[in-house]
Amino acid sequence: MDIIKIFLLILGSFVIFGISGMISGWLDRKITARLQWRIGPPWWQNFADFLKLTGKETVIPDRANEFLFFLSPAIGIISVVITGAVLLSGIFYKPARWDLFIFIYLMMIPSITIFLAGAASGNVLASVGAGRELRLLLSYELPFILALLVPVVKYHSAQISEIMNYQMMYKINVGYISGLIAFIVGLLAFQGKLGYVPFDVSEAETEIAGGTFVEYSGVLLAMFKLTKWILLSVGVTFFVIYFLGGFHNLITGILKYLLVLLLIVLIKNTNPRLRTDQILRFSWGWLTILGFFALILSLAGF
Amino acid sequence: MDIMVYYFIGIPFIAGLFCLLLPDKWKTLMWAIAFDVCLVLFGYFVYFFDKIPALTGNLFVWDGLTNFTLLGVSFFGLIISLYSYNLTIDFLNRYYGFLLLTVASGIGVSVSNNLLLMAVFWGILAITLYMMINLGGSDAAYPAKKTFIMVGGSDSFLILGIAIVWVLTGVLNITEMHIEIDRALAACGFLSFVIAAFTKAGAMPFHSWIPEIAENAPVSVMAFLPASIDKLLGIYLLARVCLNMFSYHETMWFLLRLVGALTIVCAVFMALIQHNMKKLLAYHAVSQVGYMVLGIASANSVGVVGGLFHMLNHAIYKCCLFLGAGSVEEKTKTTDLDQLGGLAGMMPITFVSFLFASFAISGIPPFNGFFSKWMIYQGLVEAGKSGEPSWILWIVMALIGSGLTLASFMKIIHAVFLGQKSASIEKKDIKEVHWTMFVPATILSLLCLCFGLFYFQIPLSKFFLPIMRIDNMEYILNLELPLLLIIAGIILGFVIYPMFMPRKRRIAPVFIGGEKQEEEMRISGTEFYNVIRDTRFLKTMYVAAEKKITDLYEVLKSTVLYFTEGFRVIHTGILGTYLTWILFGTLVFLYIFIRW
C-alpha cells in the first residue's frame, strides 16, 4: 500500500463523511422539524452554517489554556476522519485489514476531545459539562462494547473482513435474535456517544448553556460541529457495515443508512433529557443486562 | 561471558555500599556515582544488545527475556537517578545506596538460572524496598512495615515453591525443568511461584501494599520500585514460571486469567474515587498488572508477547506519571487533587508529558499502551477458539477497564492541570521544574509515542520476537493500515489546521450567564464520579473496601490478633510477673528433678 493511497483515503474520508455528515445532520433537523409541525431548514443549511461560523470572530476566555483550547477541536476532527478512513478502507479494499478493537478505541477519542475542550476553557459551566461527558463515557461504554462483541462471539473473530464475509455468505447479523438485540443496545449506546437526547447532558443548552462548548465560537465551534456531523455519519455507516450487511448494493446500502439514521432521530425526538445518575443506572442496568443476554444467546447460536 | 555477569552485579553492588558509607552532605558525588554506574550499565546493555551470545550455565542464564529485562532495569535506574539530582530528602546516602543495590539485585534476579540464587537476590530486593520506603519519614513507617511483611511473606512462598520443585524434579535450574501439573504437589508449587510474582508485581489480592505506601513514600521511589522495577521483575518471574518451568494446565491458567481480569476492574474502580494523585496512580499500577497477567495467561504467542509488551509499556508510562506527580508535588507541596488546578499554563512541559502518558495508559492510539492491549485482546480471542466461553468475559472486563482508566485519568488532568485554579495555587508563583526533573519525564513520554508509532520496528522485532515466535503474524500486520492512516491523518491535520487558525481573535473573561466567576464556584474534578460511588451495588463494595475487608494483609492481621489475644493476657511486659513465673517454673522443675 503506497503513501498516495493512504493520503487519498484520508482526504476521501474527509470529503465523503463531511458531506454525508452534513446532509445527515440536515435530515436530522428536517425530520425533527416535521415531527414538531415546523417546516425545517433547506438542505444546504448546514453548509451555510459552517461557512458562516468560519468567518466569525473567535473569543478566547482569559482563563483558558490556549494550547489545548485550540488543539482539541483539531484532534477531534482528525480522529473522526481517521475512523472514517479506516471504515472506507474496509469498503474499498478487500479484504479489509482492521478489526473491532481499533474501532472501539478510535471511537473513544472524540469524547476525550470534547472533555479536553471543556476542561481547557477555564469556565465552571464547561467544567460541569466536561465532568458529565466523562460520566456519559463511562455509562455507555460498557453496553457499547457488549453489543459490538456479539458478532465477535458468533464468528470467533474480531476481523472486520471475516465478519463482513460471514454476513454475505449466511445472513446479516440483525437476522439473528442476538444480533437484533445487540443492534438495539449498540444504537442506544451510540446515541450517548453522539451526545443526542436523551443523553445530551454534557451540552444541555437549557441548563449549562452548551456545557463543554460554552466558550467556543467562530472556526473552533465550526470544527466541533463538523466533528459531530462526521461522527454521526461514520457511526451510522459502521452500524450498516457491522450489523446490516454493508454496502454491497449501493441503493439498499443507502436505504439501510437512512433507516439507521431515522431510528436515531426518532429516539432523539421522543425522549426527555436524563440526569447522569439515571443514565448510569439505565446503561449499567438494563442495557448491560440486555447486552449480556445477547452475548449468551449468540454463544448458544441464536 | 560468565565473568562479565559478576561485573554487572558486582559494580552497582559495590558502588551502592560505597554510597552508604559516604557522608550525607556529598550530594553531587553520590548522584554522580549512581548516575554514571547506571549510564555505563545501560550503555553496555544497549551496545551489546544483539551481540551477547546466549548462555545457559549452572548459575546464570542469558536469553532474549534476560536481555530485555536487563535493559529495562538499567534504563529505569538511569532515569530515576537523573530525576533525583535536585531531590530534597533526608539520608541521601541511603537513597542512592539502596537505589544501586536495587539495580544490582534486579540484574541478579534476571540473570540467575539457579532458583536459590534468584531467591537470594529476590530477598535483597525486599530489603531495599523496605529501606527506600522508610526514607519517606515517620509517616512511612507503618506502610513500610506492611510492605515488608507482605513482600517478605511472598518470599517464603517463593522458597516453598523452590522446595517443591526440587522434590519433583531434583534440579534447581530454570532452563532444565518442564513440569507437568498433574498432581496436587505440582499445583502447589506453581501457585507458590505465582503468589511470589503477584505480590511483587501487585496483582490482587496481594496488591494492598502499593496503595498503602503511595502517599508517604518519596515519589521517585514509587516511580522506581512499584511502578517499573517491581513490575518488570514480577512479570519476569511469572513469564519464566508460565513459559519455561511449568507446562500448560487448563484450570491453573483459568485461575490466572480470572485473577488478571478481576484485578483490572476492581483496582480501577478503587482508583476512580481517590482524592490523592499518588494513591490514584498506585491503584492504576495495580490495575494494569491485570492486563499483563491476562496476556501471559492467554497461553498463545500473540497474547504472551502482548503481555510482555504491556509490562514494558506500563513501566514507561507509569514511571512518567509518577515523575509528573513528583514534579507537581515539588512545586505545590501537595498531591491532594482538591487543592490543585490550572497548572497547565505554569508547567507546560510536565503537563504535556503527563498528558501523553495518560493517553498511553488509557490505550489511545497511536500511543504504546494501545498496541499491547490490542495484542492481548487478539490473544484472548485466539484462546477462545479452544471452545471454552469464558474468554468473552475477560475481553469485556479488559475493555471496560480501559474505558474506566481513561475516565479516571481525565479526572486527574482536569483536577491538576486544567479547570480552575484553587486559592492556594493562585497565591503561589509556580514555574516549570528544574530541567533534571522534566527531562526524564519528557524522554519517557516520547518513548510512549515512539513505541506506539514504531511498535513493530522497535519493541516487537528487537525485544519480543527473539523471545517468542508469533505463529500468526498476519494478526500483527493487521494494525499496519490503521496505523498508517493515523499517522497520515495527524500529518495532514497539522498541515491543514494552521490555515484554519482563527484570524479574528479577542480575549474576554469567561462567561457564566453574566456573573463573575468566584472561587467557591470552582469545580475541582474530584467529585466527577460521586454518582458511581452512590450506585446501590457499588456502594456496598466501596464501603467494604474502605473497611479493608478486601485487604489480605489486614484480614490476616486481624485473624492472627484474634487468636493471639489469649497470649496477650499472659505477656503483660511487667518484669515482676515474668520473674514470678520463672521462679515458679524453676521450683516445679526442681521438684520434678529431685523426685526423679
Image (cartoon, coloured by chain):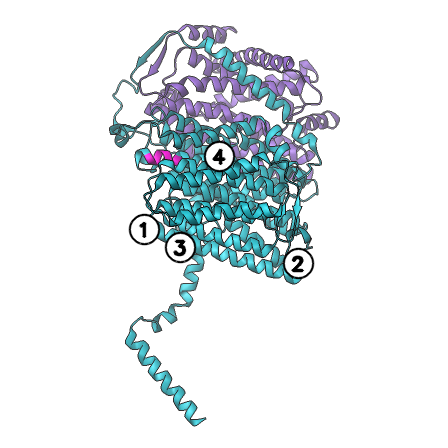
Q: Residues under labels 1 and 3: Cα distance?
A: 12 Å
Q: Which mark is residue B317?
A: 4
Looking at marks 3 and 4 on the same chain, the residue that comes earlier in the sequence is marked by: 3
Identify residue for label 3: B145
Label 3 sits on a secondary structure element that is helix
Looking at the magenta stretch, what is its main secondary structure? helix
CA neighbours of label 2 inside 10 A, class few (<14), some (14 to 19), many (20+): some
Q: Is residue A228 visible?
A: no
**Outermost residue toward the bottom in this view:** B595
Q: Is residue A181 left or right of residue B565?
A: right
Chain B shade in the render = cyan
Looking at marks 2 and 1 on the same chain, the residue that comes earlier in the sequence is marked by: 1
In depth, the one of A13 and A257 nearer the eye is A13
Q: Which mark is residue B138?
A: 1
Chain A shade in the render = purple
Name the residue rendered at 41%, 38% in the picture.
B32
Identify residue for label 2: B171
Instruction: Verify CB contact (< 8 Å) between mark 3 and mark 2.
Output: no
- The subunit letter for the residue under badge 4 reads B
Looking at the picture, which amino acid does disc 2 mark?
Val
Q: Position of residue B278 (x, y in %)?
A: 39, 40
Looking at the picture, which amino acid does disc 4 mark?
Tyr
Q: Position of residue B126 (x, y in %)?
A: 47, 52
Image: magenta residue range: B325-330
Looking at the picture, which amino acid does disc 1 mark?
Ser
